[in-house]
Amino acid sequence: MVRLVLIFLIITLPSCTFQKPSSLTVTCIDVGQGDSLLISFPNGKHWLVDAGGVPAGDTESGVDPGHRNVLSVLRAKAIQSLDVVVMTHPDEDHVQGMLAVARHVPVSQVYWNGFEGSRTEKKVRKEFTQRGTRMNVVKAGDVTRVGDVGVSVLSPPAEPILGTRSPENENSVIMLIRYGTKSILLTGDVEEAGERKLLATFGLEIRNVSLLKVAHHGSDSSSMSDFVRRTRPGIAFVSCGKRNRYGHPSGDVIKRLERVGADVYRTDQCGMLEWMTDGRSEAVATMLPCNKNALREAQGVTN
């Protein structure tokens, strides 16, 4: 496998961008203690998966990560519209920033898991609907192609997972994206029960993924040992806030990932992250030098 690691020392948005016409790029936007991923496809389509948020945040005030961070990245990349927005589940730290997106960026359609949440989440869906955006409830088994890239929905299951600590998390929209020999697994905030369901239903499909968006900000309620061993990611992205009150990511989760050989990148240490592939080789870019292995590889040092 060919892997190139790029470390950017100049902290500007354009410097963390290396999209090529034939590349698939995943940008993990630094929204603090939340999630937001931008998927840029080789054919010029763009999908946004979640948009960050803070429970006490006042959207549109300038402190909302959707307004401050997500819209800034879209503008820096000259992205004027989005083909698909994915709301993985209704938690505030994933959907609150979508209000700014709905108000400022034309969106063709929204994928969501059908679980209603807070007033903010309902307000976001109402905003999209009023602007003519199609709202689609997706389920495991839904498949689409974006040019040469395949996108498969692996969750929520047809029969939702109920009776757990957080059904909203367990039934997150989970997607597997394939381009050439490379694969990306986006997990929302799925926890142990949802991971077990994934292994039972899609165990073969999710083996040895190239890039894993680590579930639930690296919480120890997710990324169980069996799941990590089966997915065995080459690269793992963790989206979490600096000195967050939840203690994310869990040290045990990081150890599990490193034990299977994953290079782990965290937004609280690295800032915004990017992973790019042409379907054969891959590269990682970070806003800040933050990973010992990445630094060694960038310097041409081999273990």
Image: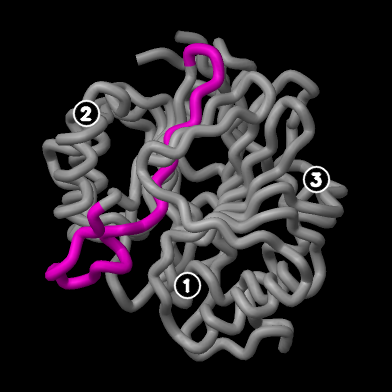
- Give the side of residue 299 with respect to residue 33, left or right: right
**Location of mark 1 (residue):** 93
Nearer to the camera, 135 or 58: 135
Q: Between label 1 and label 2, give the one nearer the viewer.
A: 2
x and y percent of residue 104 in the render?
81, 70
Tell me the SS state at disc 2. Answer: loop
Q: Is residue 150 above or below residue 185?
A: above
Q: Between label 1 and label 3, give the one nearer the viewer.
A: 1
Q: How is the image coloured?
A: one colour
Rendered-image quadrant of the N terminus = top left
Residue 19 visible somewhere in the drawing: yes
Residue shown at the point (60%, 83%) measured from the top left: 123
Give the amino acid at mark 1. Asp
Residue shown at the point (38%, 32%) measured from the top left: 263
Whether 161 is among the magenta residues is yes
Give the amino acid at mark 3. Pro
**Marking on residue 274:** none
Q: CA distance from mark 1 to mark 2?
A: 29 Å
Residue shown at the point (46%, 51%) measured from the top left: 138
x and y percent of residue 71 in the render?
75, 64
Q: From which residue to which does the magenta span run?
A: 159-181
**Location of mark 2 (residue):** 203
**Location of mark 3 (residue):** 14
Q: Is residue 13 above or below residue 23?
A: below
Tell me the SS state at disc 1. Answer: helix
Give the amino acid at mark 2. Gly
